[in-house]
Amino acid sequence: METDTIAAISTPMGEGAIAIIRLSGPDSIGIADKLYNGKRKLKEVESHTIHYGKINDPRTGEHVEEVMVSVLRGPKTFTRENIVEINCHGGLMSVNRVLELALSQGARLAEPGEFTKRAFLNGRIDLLQAEAVMDLIRAKTDRAMTVAMGQMEGRLSKLVHQLRQTLLEIIASVEVNIDYPEYDAEEVTNHLLLDKAQMVHDKIEELLVTAKQGKILREGLSTVIIGRPNVGKSSLLNSLVHENKAIVTDIPGTTRDVIEEYVNIRGVPLRLVDTAGIRDTEDIVERIGVERSRKVLKEADLILLLLNYHESLTYEDRQLFEAIKGMDAIVIVNKTDLDCRISLDEVQTLACGQPVITTSLLKEEGIDDLEQAIASLFFQQGIETQDVTYVSNTRHIALLAQANEAINEAINSIGLGVPVDMAQIDVRRTWEILGEIVGDTVSDSLIDQLFSQFCLGK
């Protein structure tokens, strides 16, 4: 257990109205008291109160900052340790000066995520809730934030703990059968084991069903806009972002590189990528852009293929249809404000069941239909964030899949008449894997790795 006192800036770097320097540990109040000059000493004030005063350099007596200082005594704090938060002006120099003074009086600079790590190590939250803190910080839509809040409040943790308790009951019943066979009929134990193992399996299956949607809400969809030059790819990016991020001209090949931007489409976060028009070209710079376009195409979750309503389908268009075959894609026929020269019937045939939307980006027509198509493609029944427990973290999804495989092995073993003590091996393995999700059976190295991904001061 950590016994030293850590300090870090908990607000983003740069100019702002207010910045916060956070201290946590047994000496946090004492260290702050060496710097603080107010009506009362901080060690004398009540917990969870805020106080006006000034920060002085204890070595020179120089007045450094005018501050509001919050004092929170453990264990009723985020880290379950004494915490002091110094609110000062948000200038780069002032906040760094206050932090330097705190470090000079005995605090240690916190590592990334160390405040949250201490909350986990001190039993304030489990590992799943700790990871949800980072998800909340990184949330890019209201729905993603709601999912992260549900996990941070323990909705998924509670369910995982319940499943582990059920598995523990199975293990205990098997142990009784092994130690006292005269008091516990094997058929009864098998029946109990099968029922409870099946219940755990069904619950894990329910969670895995939400995994795809949950991961989308957490990480966003990597969405690539492709098409021949001058079909409206940059105009589409600008329309969805509601900002002129990409240069739009009538000159083919204007976009030379990949442009990325996050956008919220009806609660679905999209990492939108505008690519250089895919075509054969002699221009060296444009050719590099085309190659990058082909690369991001292979890594995409969603493809938006643009065609020109005012031109007949070309060999390059048909090649693009071939390139996205079997992928999640939406075909957009743009420039409906011009005369129709494309065969929409052929487009529908080439799309092979993929949604086809017509738009006039110039007149801002068809955007609502496109947004609805994107939302429906990945959330056919809508996004239910209030009652559904979403699994969104890749680590959690992988562990649930392993747990599901292990409990399936146990169920199959029972069905084949394998002795209960052998079936119990897979039950115990399931219990251990679920424990990795909440941090009960996880290695120190994994904990260090997970918290190292957090931002400094959190």
Image (spheres, helix red, strand yellow):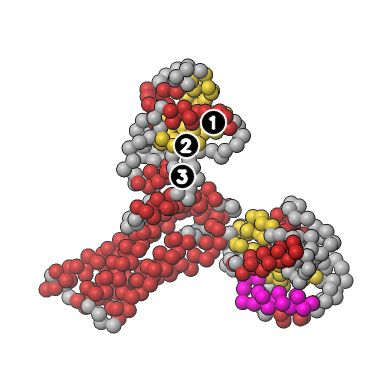
Vertically, is 143 above or below 16?
Answer: below
Vertically, is 376 above or below 73?
Answer: below
- The spot of residue 52 in percent (x, y) is 50, 23
Mark 3 lies on residue: 112
Along the line of sight, the residue nearer the viewer: 176 or 60? 60
Q: Is residue 26 located in the magenta-colored stretch of the structure?
A: no
Local SS, label 3 = loop
Q: Picture quarter containing residue 94?
A: top right
Q: Amino acid at mark 2?
A: Ala
Local SS, label 2 = strand
Sort mark 2 into few (<14), some (14-19) or many (20+) by Cα contacts within 10 Å: many
Mark 2 lies on residue: 8
Sort mark 3 into few (<14), some (14-19) or many (20+) by Cα contacts within 10 Å: some
Along the line of sight, the residue nearer the viewer: 246 or 329? 246
Camera sees residue 364: no
Vertically, is 55 above or below 218?
Answer: above
Residue at the spot x=61%, y=58% of the render? 269
Residue 228 falls left or right of residue 106: right
Mark sitting earlier along the chain (1/2): 2
Sort mark 1 into few (<14), some (14-19) or many (20+) by Cα contacts within 10 Å: many
Residue located farthest toward the left when viewing the structure as drawn: 182
Mark 1 lies on residue: 95
Residue 144 falls left or right of residue 193: right
- The spot of residue 171 in percent (x, y) is 24, 66
Q: Which residues are magenta?
A: 314-329
Q: Amino acid at mark 1?
A: Val
Asked whether the residues under the numbered discs 1 and 3 touch, taking CB atoms below 8 Å apart as contact, a structural biologist would say no
- The spot of residue 334 in percent (x, y) is 79, 67
Residue 250 falls left or right of residue 152: right
Q: Is residue 321 located in the magenta-colored stretch of the structure?
A: yes
Mark sitting earlier along the chain (2/3): 2
